[in-house]
């Protein structure tokens, strides 16, 4: 048994001369086969250049006067300073709201709870937590920041004012 039987499907040119003679018997002109160029679907018609190129409208320049460069590139501190100069004394509530937004104080709050009172409440709560978290040892290191006039001893004052008596003697 053969794996392939080539006699059933074979390409044989033995009958080719008989086919050409059959054209003559039937009076049909014999033309050799040519390659048919396929016509594929083209999404656009072929380009036919015009004499003059079409004149497209130029895009308008960007409206930079409507774009605030200071607002886009400035720091939050400078934006806060600019906003503070624009506000009057009657606009304290508006200033607190805008300052809270600029500094990110009320980010966790829903939009309807972002009032000036609520923002100040959050700031005071954060300040209290900061003061509670500061140990006394660290605060003692910063004693010069909290020193008042009453903290100086009287001996130091006598040293400062001892020179006044000498000036009085020069005049008299």
Image: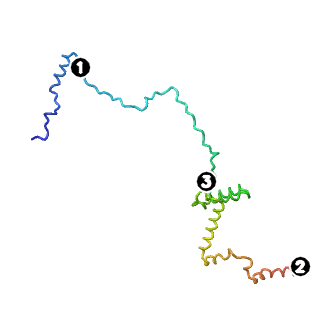
User: Is 155 displayed left or right of 52 in the figure?
Assistant: right
118 w.r.t. 33: above or below: below
Quarter residue 47 falls in = top left
Residue at image point 62% right, 78% down: 136
Q: Earlier in the sequence, mark 2 or mark 3?
A: 3
Q: Which residue is mark 2?
A: 171
Considering depth in this image, is 18 or 88 the residue closer to the camera?
Answer: 88
Quarter residue 33 falls in = top left
Nearest-to-viewer mark from 2 and 1: 1
Q: Which mark is residue 73?
A: 3
Which structural element holds mark 1? loop
Residue 73 visible? yes
Q: Please provide percent x and percent y for residue 63.
A: 62, 43
Considering depth in this image, is 58 or 137 the residue closer to the camera?
Answer: 137
| Residue furthest out toward the bottom | 155
Residue at image point 17% right, 31% down: 11
Real-space CA distance between mark 2 and mark 3, rounded to the nearest whole angstrom: 63 Å
Q: Which residue is mark 1?
A: 30
Quarter of the image with the N terminus is top left
Q: Earlier in the sequence, mark 2 or mark 1?
A: 1
| Residue furthest out toward the front | 112
Real-space CA distance between mark 2 and mark 1, rounded to the nearest whole angstrom: 145 Å
Real-space CA distance between mark 3 and mark 1, rounded to the nearest whole angstrom: 83 Å
Considering depth in this image, is 100 or 17 the residue closer to the camera?
Answer: 100
Q: Please provide percent x and percent y for residue 99.
A: 65, 59
User: Is 118 displayed left or right of 172 in the figure?
Assistant: left
Q: Please provide percent x and percent y for residue 147.
A: 70, 76
Nearest-to-viewer mark from 2 and 3: 3
């Amino acid at each position: 048994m053969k794996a392939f039987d080539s006699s059933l499907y074979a390409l044989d040119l033995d009958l080719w001369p008989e086919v050409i003679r059959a054209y003559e018997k039937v009076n049909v002109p014999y033309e050799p086969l040519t390659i048919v160029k396929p016509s594929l679907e083209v999404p656009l018609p072929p380009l036919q250049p015009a004499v003059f190129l079409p004149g497209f409208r130029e895009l308008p320049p960007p409206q930079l006067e409507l774009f605030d460069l200071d607002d886009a590139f400035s720091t939050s501190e400078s934006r806060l300073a600019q906003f503070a100069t624009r506000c009057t004394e009657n606009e304290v509530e508006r200033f607190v709201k805008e300052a809270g937004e600029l500094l990110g104080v009320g980010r966790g709050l829903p939009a309807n709870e972002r009032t000036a009172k609520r923002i100040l409440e959050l700031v005071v709560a954060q300040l209290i937590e900061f003061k509670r978290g500061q140990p006394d040892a660290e605060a003692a290191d910063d004693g010069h920041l909290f020193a008042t006039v009453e903290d100086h001893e009287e001996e130091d004052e006598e040293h400062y004012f001892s020179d006044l008596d000498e000036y009085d003697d020069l005049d008299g």
